Image (cartoon, rainbow, N blue to C red):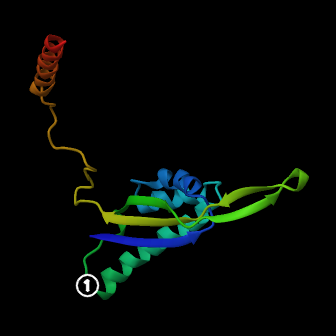
């Protein structure tokens, strides 16, 4: 089960928000809250509030909707900062000119999920422990055959 919280129109550039979100992605919720509490970025307080909101969403579903959720096993599955609308502004410049600049806005979204019973969650990892040894040889053979064909055409 996944639990989501989002905040929109945050007055911070998405690039700066992504710096903080990269710190907490994949962490348990408790560790992520500790990380955000000691991060010196201004946006960390907004992200911490958003993370707490996602945890409360999970808590609400577990109590009111009778969904079995262990809040201790939640982790940050996805944390994204997307672009919002941009505010175009003008700064006075010398000799009566004007310079344009842009104030960026971010839409931030956090997705929480519950880890498996044993605490191990594969994030896109395959179960195959040994890589296939035949695939590279087939690629090399295909490259050699195309090289010969192109050389014979010339």
- Residue furthest right in the image: 95
In the rendered image, the vertical position of residue 128 relative to residue 149, given as above or below? below
Res 127 quadrant in image: top left
Instruction: Estimate how packed mark 1 is, as few (under 14), some (14 to 19) or many (20 or more) residues with alpha carbons within 10 Å.
Output: few
**At which x and y percent is residue 97?**
83, 55
In the rendered view, does 101 fall on the left or right side of 105?
right
Which residue is disc 1 drawn over? Answer: 66
In the rendered image, the vertical position of residue 92 relative to residue 71, given as above or below? above
In the rendered view, does 89 fall on the left or right side of 104?
right
In this view, the residue in front, 16 or 146, is 146
- Residue furthest bottom in the image: 64
In the rendered image, the vertical position of residue 68 relative to residue 88, given as above or below? below
In this view, the residue in front, 122 or 34, is 122
How many numbered discs, if any?
A: 1
**At which x and y percent is residue 41?**
64, 55
x 46%, y 71%: residue: 6
In this view, the residue in front, 70 or 146, is 146
> SS at mark 1?
loop
Q: Which quadrant would the N terminus be assigned to in this image?
A: bottom left
Res 149 quadrant in image: top left
Res 66 quadrant in image: bottom left
In the rendered view, does 100 fall on the left or right side of 144?
right
Q: Which quadrant would the C terminus be assigned to in this image?
A: top left
In the rendered view, does 29 fall on the left or right side of 97?
left
**At which x and y percent is residue 96?**
88, 56
x 43%, y 65%: residue: 110
């Amino acid at each position: 089960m996944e639990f989501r919280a989002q905040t929109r129109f945050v007055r911070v550039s998405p690039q700066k928000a992504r710096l903080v979100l990269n710190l907490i992605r994949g962490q348990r919720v408790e560790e992520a809250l500790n990380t955000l509490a000691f991060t010196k970025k201004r946006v960390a307080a907004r992200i911490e509030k958003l993370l707490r909101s996602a945890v409360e969403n999970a808590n609400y579903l577990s109590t009111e909707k009778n969904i079995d959720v262990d809040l201790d096993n939640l982790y940050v599955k996805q944390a994204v900062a997307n672009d919002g609308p941009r505010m175009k502004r003008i700064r006075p410049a010398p000799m009566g000119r004007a310079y344009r600049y842009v104030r960026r806005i971010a839409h931030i979204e956090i997705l929480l999920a519950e880890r498996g019973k044993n605490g191990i969650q594969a994030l896109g990892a395959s179960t195959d422990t040994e890589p296939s040894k035949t695939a590279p040889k087939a690629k090399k053979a295909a490259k050699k055959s195309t090289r010969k064909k192109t050389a014979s055409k010339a």
